[in-house]
Image: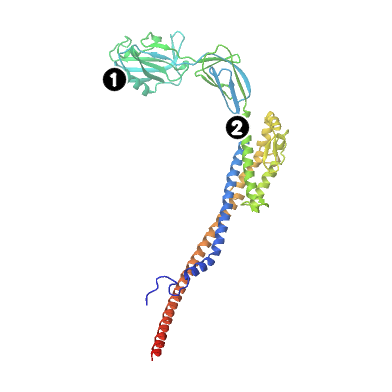
């Protein structure tokens, strides 16, 4: 008898279909669990979006509790090429008249002309010292706190390029460069910083023994106080000089950062007429922070509305419809917007400064009321930003909202606990699916074994039936012939 190679051949029954249908019936609980897992994953994703939305709202609310937001200022200049202005949170609004008589400058000296940057100068020692020159160059006052720097040159004699590199490496408060044009090359020395105290003199100990003859390394000497002027001075070090509202001020640099509280002035050129500088509250950046808060709140409100709604017409529900934590979150936010505060003596509710709550819970700004709030900025700041740990009713509303968001987003807050609960349910669901799949695999294996045995038995019986039929037919034919 031929062996059975495919189940059902022996019996003629569609056993494979029978097994498939029986296994499918056993898998019904798995399909239900998979559907439940999809729902749980959708809810977890919804909470992830709420977490991001709440974090954005918290950050926007926190911005409205910071003094730097409400204290933002901006500056303007009637001639930005002559005077630019930068403000800070400590700036007080005001107007100032600025005149620039002189810009701060560096001292600049140059040697005579050499054939090229590779031309040899000499050897010996250079001494560079910072300080202040008198107007007639008859005296030099060393800079307080600075130390003269000695620079060894050679042997052998060194070139302009080599001297440039050695001077720059010495960090003596002087910057060296080689200027090359059609006539040749010159070594140029300039102060590293502006201001009259950053002038310099150059002493030379020449290896040839002649320290002031202008030859060899002596070509770099510059000390008019002792009559040595070998290296020519092209520009004198000087302080900036200006007047602010008629008062004379000087500075070693062209940036005046301590003349006016909270204001930094940068001088760009000498003026022929007064420059008007104004510092004022930066209502544009404050408005941007307010708009950012409204946008973050409305986006979170939209998410909560979509996730918790039920549409009777389509009989469809949001992923968190009926979820107590999400419903409570929306109710808390809406309730907070309508609360009153004693933080400000002028404003007690957000609606009074233009934050109107719509029927869907979103905020729409009333420009007229908002303009009135911005016109009374200190009181509006209190309404949003004041913090009073002892008297909760004295807290600003942005402070309250930030505290609520911190609570909701905390490790034991509603979003975290609900998300963790959903993750655990998803894990349990997956474990249950795996257990059922193992059970179904065993059932299928058992069914295949049972039906395979049945198929073989029926094949055997079918074979016996065929044999008996054949024998009876043969017997009948034999009897008929007799």
| Mark with earlier residue (1, 2) | 2
User: In this figure, which residue is indicated by the disc labeled 2?
Assistant: 68
Quadrant placement of the C terminus:
bottom left
Depth-wise, is mark 1 or mark 2 nearer the camera? 2
Considering the numbered disc 2 on the image, is that residue within a helix, a strand or a loop?
A: helix
Observer able to see residue 80: yes
x then y, percent, for residue 62:
61, 38
Q: Which residue is mark 1?
A: 154
Residue 423 as seen in the image, left or right of residue 175: right
* Residue 457 spot, x, y in % from top left: 44, 78
Position of 351 with respect to 476 (left or right) is right
In the image, what residue occupies the spot 56% across and 64% down? 29
Asked if residue 65 is positioned above or below residue 257 in the image, the reply reads below
Image quarter (top left, top right, bottom left or bottom right) of the N terminus: bottom left
For the residue pair 217 and 31, the one nearer the viewer reads as: 31
Pointer 2 local density, CA inside 10 Å: few below 14, some 14–19, many at least 20: some
Q: CA distance from mark 1 to mark 2?
A: 58 Å
What is the secondary structure assignment of the residue under circle 1?
A: strand
Coloring basis for residues: rainbow
Q: Position of residue 292 (x, y in %)?
A: 61, 36
Residue 304 on image: x %, y %: 63, 47
């Amino acid at each position: 008898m031929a062996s059975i190679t495919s189940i059902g051949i022996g019996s003629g029954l569609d056993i494979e279909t029978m097994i498939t249908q029986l296994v499918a019936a056993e898998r019904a609980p798995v399909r239900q669990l998979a559907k439940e897992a999809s729902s749980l994953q959708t809810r977890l994703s919804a909470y992830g979006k709420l977490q991001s939305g709440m974090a954005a709202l918290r950050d926007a609310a926190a911005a409205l509790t910071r003094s730097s937001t409400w204290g933002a200022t901006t500056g303007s200049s009637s001639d930005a090429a002559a005077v630019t202005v930068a403000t800070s949170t400590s700036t007080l609004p005001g107007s100032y008249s600025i005149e620039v008589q002189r810009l701060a400058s560096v001292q600049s000296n140059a040697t005579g002309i050499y054939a090229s940057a590779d031309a040899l100068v000499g050897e010996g020692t250079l001494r560079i010292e910072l300080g202040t020159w008198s107007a007639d160059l008859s005296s030099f006052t060393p800079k307080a706190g600075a130390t003269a720097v000695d620079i060894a040159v050679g042997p052998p004699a060194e070139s302009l390029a080599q001297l440039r590199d050695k001077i720059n490496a010495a960090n003596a408060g002087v910057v060296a460069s080689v200027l090359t044009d059609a006539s040749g090359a010159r070594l140029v020395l300039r102060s590293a910083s502006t201001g009259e105290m950053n002038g310099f003199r150059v002493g030379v100990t020449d290896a040839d023994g002649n320290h002031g003859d202008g030859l060899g390394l002596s070509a770099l000497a510059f000390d008019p106080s002792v009559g040595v002027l070998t290296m020519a001075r092209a520009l004198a070090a000087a302080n900036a000089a200006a007047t602010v509202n008629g008062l004379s001020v000087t500075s070693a640099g062209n940036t005046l950062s301590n003349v006016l509280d909270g204001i930094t002035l940068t001088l760009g050129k000498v003026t022929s007429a007064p420059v008007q500088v104004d510092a004022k509250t930066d209502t544009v950046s404050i408005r941007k922070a307010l708009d950012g808060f409204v946008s973050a709140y409305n986006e979170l409100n939209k998410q909560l509305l979509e996730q918790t709604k039920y549409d009777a017409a389509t009989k469809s529900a949001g992923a968190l419809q009926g979820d107590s934590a999400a419903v409570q979150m929306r109710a808390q936010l809406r309730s907070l917007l309508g609360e009153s505060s004693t933080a400000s003596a002028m404003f007690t509710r957000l609606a009074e400064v233009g934050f109107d709550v719509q029927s869907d819970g979103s905020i729409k700004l009333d420009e007229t009321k908002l303009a009135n709030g911005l016109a009374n900025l200190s009181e509006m700041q209190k309404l949003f930003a004041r913090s009073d740990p002892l008297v909760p009713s004295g807290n600003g509303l942005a402070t309250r909202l930030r505290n609520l968001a911190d609570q909701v987003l905390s490790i034991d807050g509603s979003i975290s606990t609900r998300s963790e609960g959903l993750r655990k349910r998803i894990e349990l669901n997956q474990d249950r699916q795996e257990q059922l799949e193992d059970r179904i695999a065993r059932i299928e294996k058992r069914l295949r074994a049972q039906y395979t045995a049945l198929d073989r038995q029926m094949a055997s019986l079918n074979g016996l039936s065929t044999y008996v039929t054949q024998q009876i037919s043969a017997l009948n034919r034999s009897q008929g012939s007799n």
